Image: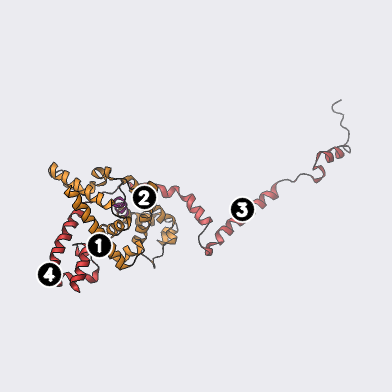
Chain colours: A red, B orange
Amino acid sequence: MVHNRLADLLAAYGSHIENWPKHDQMLFSERTDDIQITEKFIEAQRLDQQLDSFAVSTNPNLKALITSKIKLRLVDRFYQWLVPNSWKLAWQPAIAAMLVVLLGFSIGVQVEQPSPLASNWEDQLYWAGFAPEDDSYE
Amino acid sequence: MVAVSKGNQDAFQQLLHVHVDAINRFARRMSGNSHEADDITQETMLRLWQHAHKFDSRRSKLTTWLHSIARNLCMDHHRKNARFTPLEECSDDLCKGATSGGTETRGPEINLHTIQTESLVHGALLSLPERQRSALVLSYYQQLPNQAVAEILAVSLSATESLLARARRNLKQILDDSHGT
């Protein structure tokens, strides 16, 4: 039972016992005299050495790049606030919509309404007939 | 994370400092191209910034969540590009970490041998099926616990072990074949 489990562990995790699941790490010390397991261990170790040779570098400029991008993406955050994913935050678009309505209303109040008496050219001609005569052009 | 979800840039900087290199190494091993890997890393960290409110610490660890995002992005890039770019960059910037710290003191033959081994291993990794490659990189290189690997791959613990065993078996086969040729 232990033999089979050890073979499975070596096949899956290799020879770095510290990478094995915690509860299985003690198993290896129980079977140090098992020749088959020792052979499998050496075989796994050979593959691990090759895997360990493939180390990669990291880009040191990434942090600065990402930091500069989050500052640009404030517009995205406003969009997220405006269109939330949860119904619990539905008050956010409601507030935004209310503000737009209030803004429209306040602009509408300030704009001067045209006289209803002169809404088209026929009315303007009609009312012009009542205006006093202007002799300034004579 | 709560502070990040409220737009606290200092809190984000701290998380960035802790996680960015690990995610970058993961992306570089998963893809064959350092520029693509850097794009994936940036996008992963920007998603952390934008979607921090979606993270639930009761369901998973932040490392697991970030690796999950990065893996999905790697798969998206892979689909867009149809196949991963092969090894043209492995011998220069991508593998510098492997040879840094002492390459100058070693002879040119040993240096060349190291670079060849790195290229072989990277090539072998890229030729594995995506799930096997993900399992191996997450478990062996990123040293994530089994539970986290299983969560990222959306499989059971026993299926994760099975994927890892198949990945190592296939990798050994590919490397033995390439050494033989």
Q: Which residue is mark 2?
A: B78
Whether the magenta-drawn stretch holds residue B25 is answered as yes
The answer to whether the residue labelled 3 contacts the one labelled 2, judged by CB atoms less than 8 Å apart, is no
Q: Residue furthest bottom?
A: A1
Are the numbered discs 4 and 3 placed on the same chain, yes or no? yes
SS for dot 2: helix
Q: Amino acid at mark 4?
A: Asp
Q: Foreground residue, B175 or A41?
A: B175
Disc 4 and disc 3: Cα gap in Å?
A: 78 Å
The residue identified by callout 4 is A34
- Mark 2 or mark 1, earlier in chain: 2
Mark 3 residue type? Val
Which span is picked out in magenta?
A: B23-31
* Magenta stretch: includes residue B156: no
| Percent position of residue A49, x then y | 17, 55
Residue drawn at (25%, 68%), measured in percent from left and top? A21
Confirm or deny contact between disc 2 and disc 4 (CB under 8 A).
no
Q: Would you name the residue on which mark 3 appears? A: A100
How far across and down, in percent of the image, does residue B41 sit?
Answer: 35, 51
Residue B145 percent coordinates (x, y): 28, 64
Marks 2 and 1, how far apart at CA: 24 Å
- Asked if both marks, 2 and 4, belong to the same chain, the answer given is no
Q: Residues within 10 Å of mark 1 (few under 14, many from 20)?
A: many
Q: CA distance from mark 1 to mark 3?
A: 60 Å
Whichever of callouts 4 and 3 sits on the residue coming sooner in the sequence is: 4
Amino acid tagged 1: Ala
Q: Secondary structure at mark 1?
A: helix
Q: Element at badge 4? A: loop
Which element carries disc 3, helix, strand or loop?
Answer: helix
Quarter of the image with the N terminus of chain B is bottom left
